[in-house]
Image: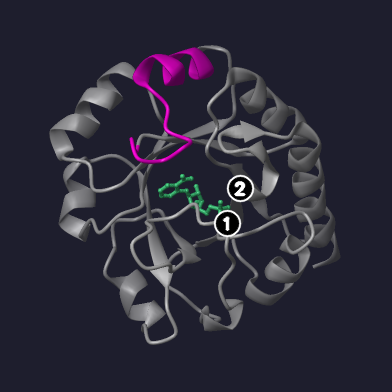
Amino acid sequence: MSVVRSKICGITRLEDALAAVAAGADAIGLVFYARSPRAVSVQQAQAILAGLPPFVTTVGLFVDMPQHEIEAVLAAVPLDLLQFHGNERAADCDALARPYIKALRVRAEDDVAALVDAYPGARAVLLDTYVDGVPGGTGQAFDWALVPAVLSKPVILAGGLTADNVPAAITQVRPYAVDVSGGVEASKGIKDAAKVKDFVRAVRAVGELM
Ligand SMILES: O=C(O)c1ccccc1N[C@@H]1O[C@H](COP(=O)(O)O)[C@@H](O)[C@H]1O
């Protein structure tokens, strides 16, 4: 048996966060990227965190946000982990002196191992789909065969995952965790509690077989 963790990203409402927790998710993600349809304000984020039970990891997603703006968010919202989803270099990520995940968008021509090695300070890397001009949340899967079997950081697999395809994704990639946003939504920014439940259940079920 192998435990694969789940993160439900793009939460905008406390009720969706609680549905994710009830389903057994390990982490929730809040998007601090104004151009995303899942963006939350500081006030929304505070309300969500205030209503959460303990032992749920809260992750803040940022896309090329200046350091002082991230610091302002962190002063108001006690996030556990940062997720850098833009073109941040390692020095930019390290400058916050907080635990972080670096998202990397995978293309066939990339040396994925070298991309991962460029972020020695990251707690994990999140591998997502490359779509030109879109930093993430595309709802599209990538070719999981592009993920090397051995990488220097724990892998969080993302990109177009759903309850239907996540068993195959986990079986092929054997990630530390999986991350989903669009695949468990009723509409942009609004989660479907049944889809969230099915997703987490599917992740657990395949983990029990490994
Ligand atoms: O969700 C967004 O709108 C978003 C915007 C900018 C960067 C990343 C974003 N989301 C992250 O993208 C991946 C995959 O999402 P999906 O499951 O394919 O919809 C995931 O980590 C989201 O958190």
Q: Is residue 97 left or right of residue 157?
A: left
In the rendered image, the vertical position of residue 178 relative to residue 51, given as above or below: below
Classify 10 Å Cα crowding around label 2: few (below 14), some (14-19), many (20 and above).
many
Ligand 1 under 8 Å from disc 2 Cβ: yes
Start and end of the magenta stretch? 33-49
Q: Element type at marker 2?
A: helix
Q: Element type at marker 1?
A: loop
Image quarter of residue 24: top right
Residue at 26% across / 20% down in the picture? 75
Image quarter of residue 3: bottom right
In the rendered image, the vertical position of residue 144 relative to residue 47, given as above or below: below
Specify whether residue 45 is painted magenta.
yes
Q: Position of residue 202 (x, y in %)?
A: 81, 53
Q: Is residue 72 left or right of residue 77?
A: left
Q: Is residue 122 left or right of residue 1?
A: left
Out of 34 and 103, give the one closest to the viewer.
Answer: 34
Residue picked out by circle 2: 182
